Image: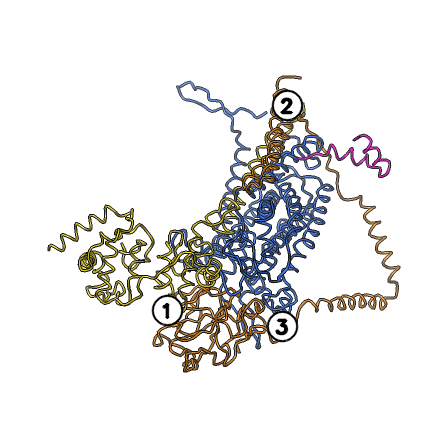
Chain colours: A orange, B yellow, C blue
Amino acid sequence: MNRSEKRGELHAALWLGLSIAGSIAFAAAYVLGGSTQAQGVALALACFGIAGALVTWSRELLPHGQVVDEQHPLRAPEAERADAVSRLLSGEAEIVGRRTWLVRLGWSAVGFLGLAALFPARSLGPSPQGQIGTSSWKSGLRLVREDGSLVRAELLEVGSVVTAFPEGLVGPDHAMNMANDAIMLVRVQQDALHLPDARRDWAPRGFIAYSKVCTHAGCPVALYRQGPQQLMCPCHQSTFDVLDGGSVVFGPAARSLPQLPLQIDADGTVRASGTMSGFVGPDAWETSSG
Amino acid sequence: MIALLAAAVLTLASETSAGQPKPPLAHATVPARGDAIKVGGDLYALHCLACHGDKLQGTPQAPGLMNSGAASVDFQLSTGRMPLEVPGTEPMRGPPSFPRDQIDAIIAYVVSHGAKGPDKPAVHSNGDLTRGRKLYEENCEACHGATATGAVAGFGWLAPALLQSTPLQTAEAVRTGPGIMPKFDERVLPQADLDALAAYVDSLHHPDDRGGYSLASAGPVGEGLVAWIAGLGITVVLMFAVGETLKAKPRG
Amino acid sequence: MIRRLVLALDDRLGAVPFLRHALRKAFPDHWSFMLGEVALYCFLFILASGTYLTFFFHPSAHHVVYDGTSVPSLHGRTMSDAYASVLRISFETRAGLLIRQAHHWCALVFAAAIIVHMSRVFFTGAFRKPRDLNWTVGLTLLLLVMGDGFTGYSLPDDQLSGAGLRIADSIALAIPVVGSWVAYLFFGGGFPSPEITNRLYAIHILFIPLALGALIALHLAILWRQKHTQFPGRGKREDNVTGSPLWPTYTVKSLALMAATFGGLLLLGGLVEINPVWLYGPYDPWTIASPAQPDWYVGWLDGALRVAPPWAMHLFGHTISALLWPGIVLPLFFFGALYAWPWVERFVTRDRAYHELLQLPWQNPLRTSFGVAALTFAGMLLLAGSDDIQARLWHVSVQQLAWFYRVGVLVFPPVAAAIAWRICVELQSRHAYEEDHPARVVLKRGGEGGFEEEPVPTP
């Protein structure tokens, strides 16, 4: 054994020692409830030790011979290829023969089987018909906050915002309702509003409500820019104008935020006075603007 | 003239102390109320009047302060946002320009001249963390981020990080809505909720990073960078080292 | 022991001829040939770590009230069983957080390794006949890994995963005509359906891993049958492969790489925090944190959603969602182009020959420019996906930055392609020049005190 081989063995041994130490350290860290960091470093050392040993082994203890493989042609000789093809074709001819109508019927049977297999797929979910872009909001529903407490007019001063839902549809059992019913209720100076004429009385005393579900990809438009009066979605930065009916100011959204018409009772209760002005959430085939 | 001189001296004093806000002075050393208003008036004249106007009425450059109050002024001054170096830009957090007693003096001046915004809110410690977190997730994280490290708020505005915000400053911001932030007064956010929120924001100063280095809380973006640079980059370097050192030598 | 095993196997399977051949199979020595192996070892690691995690994870949307003490700010909070079980894995299962984090890091590195491996294959022309077949298998593997990554990211039911699923649901809704049916059948109803976690779980731990395993086996079998390509060089021809023998040299080398890959992933898993769901909080569909990003391998899609123009169309009382273009058409075109490239190149160059020797990128300006353009395009989209973080970093308006990327996504790829073309042509002419003008010269002093160059003939 020559000197370089001895040195190689020593190096490999050191690496393996490191690996064993790492494994033991990991076991200790595990038993003693050590931190994730200690566990990770110890186990990594155990791996790196083996890697180092193998590199050393390979570099200093193994021969470095090179081998040459022949790269044989992949394709078979022409005669064999032709034979294989003709066997396939003649077999097909034997199967089909003059019975093309029967073959067609056979394929139809397979097709029908495929169609039949689609029926269980129907069980995967309910029909979306009449569901897309809807919310639970309708005229008369009172606004509540996430904890179920009523939203009253005296709650909000100008420049304030709350997330609101229809009464009775909050809590863990109504997650799907809450996902689509959430509205941003903000209060602005009433004379700053320039809503379309048809919506003139939708925002009494400057209380104005928009769906919190972005019309782009459904993220909550939770970022209320109070000075410029905009609602922005942190996912893709679609930005909507609070003052003029939720129109798109910037971003990939193609449709205004739906607005919820509001009314305020004499005792200060805030209610919806109608349904959402448009489809809630992202566009789909069914959400026609007409 | 004397007032100006006094103000200049005070400014010098304040400049030397900028960067290291003094601890609140004991009650005994706070000047009498009348004196405080006068000192505050001098400071106001020197640092605030040009933009906010001599009667707090505001100028084209800056809003009036008639709707501000102790909470707002204290927030803007104690977080170093005011005075603004370049009027019209977004105020950013920095070392306060005035020591505590001067801030109190300016507050006294502004309040005595008719500013009628909210007073400094009370914050009690031991707010309910679970409640605070819920409120934070519903009302705050869309702008300030899940870990309060701040994020963009659109069109060049930033929602600042809250990692240096004291519970009082958090409460002041919540109550007054600085910049483009909405405000939440005691009707929409009762005292217990305010305490809970302030406690939760305070708890975010020491995030639970048991998983290891937190990558400045940049989320999947930071993680992606690390995966490419540390994960794959190091592996490639290693591969290069292993592959090249172990290269088989041509026979013969 | 080994002797008896080999003999016993040969008795029953006639394995010796194969073994004799296999043990001395040549593996080329260039370091870049090991990139695919890193991906392979990532697969092994992700399988092992993932199996461990399945023992603890509950794929259930069932509500529980968190009564643990590990995260004080969640005490008493109602959350899904899935999220609660991830908290338990992270804090109450010893080594759980390490394995969870290493598993997630592995997903990120896995996808990156595949992409770098594919870039190597692409830019050296290794995908040419007969390996065009394996190129399509590899591309499918990349798509499967991205799918497995996204379903995994969506499992813990934290704030980020919920937001990601909401966006995925929106993209499904954008499919013309059948979109809402696709979304409702896949998610089991409207968003957020309680069914979804369970379904994602089946996809994440069963369907995709099975498909990955089968296709990786196919990928390797094809590789084994077709043998490796190699860079041109002395003694390297179209009809041979030169390299280390599989046994023992290459085996040791490859095992070293495996151990190093595992070590790197465990080191990351231990030291660098990833997806701290306890900081993001359980998913409430009416809340969102900013910034919100997916894992990087989906980031390009998120970027496409950010910069896409709001082009919705209304036809006969129906809507074509603006999400259709960035969410469905663009990925289909992008990956369609990658699938088709070997055949496109063959059609354009009319080169139908077998290729066992690799090219250097400059030798094929067309291919290199296309590859550079594709990478630039994807890279710009990926960058656009974090425009809000960049805007905060550089203190610019995120809206301006989005416009920059809107333009950049279209402008930079052709520019990069043109530059790549130019460099390739430059290098080609330089190499042609060097072949005509051997570089080695001897200076000889001339009679009048000047110097003269005299080329030395190359051996």
- Indicate left or right for C214 with C152 as reference: right
Q: Is residue C271 above or below residue A286?
A: above
Labels 3 and 1 share a subunit? yes
Chain hosting mark 1: A
Q: Amino acid at mark 2?
A: Glu
Dot 2: element: helix
| Residue that protrudes farthest toward the left in the picture | B1
Q: Nearer the viewer, residue A176 or C240?
A: A176
- Contact check, label 2 and label 1, Cβ < 8 Å: no
Chain hosting mark 2: A
Q: Amino acid at mark 3?
A: Pro
Q: Nearer the viewer, mark 2 or mark 1?
A: 1
| Residue that protrudes farthest toward the top in the picture | A2
Q: Nearer the viewer, mark 3 or mark 1?
A: 1
Q: Nearer the viewer, residue A107 or C396?
A: C396
Labels 2 and 1 share a subunit? yes
Would you call the spot at circle 1 few (<14 residues within 10 Å), some (14-19), or many (20 or more)?
many
Residue annotated with mark 3: A128
Q: Amino acid at mark 1?
A: Gly
Quote the CA–CA distance across marks 3 and 1: 38 Å
Residue annotated with mark 2: A9
Residue C397 lies in the magenta-colored region: no
Q: Earlier in the sequence, mark 2 or mark 1?
A: 2
Residue annotated with mark 1: A159
- Picture quarter with the N terminus of chain C: top right
Dot 3: element: loop
Please tell me which residue is depicted at 63% across the width and 75% down the height of the picture.
A129
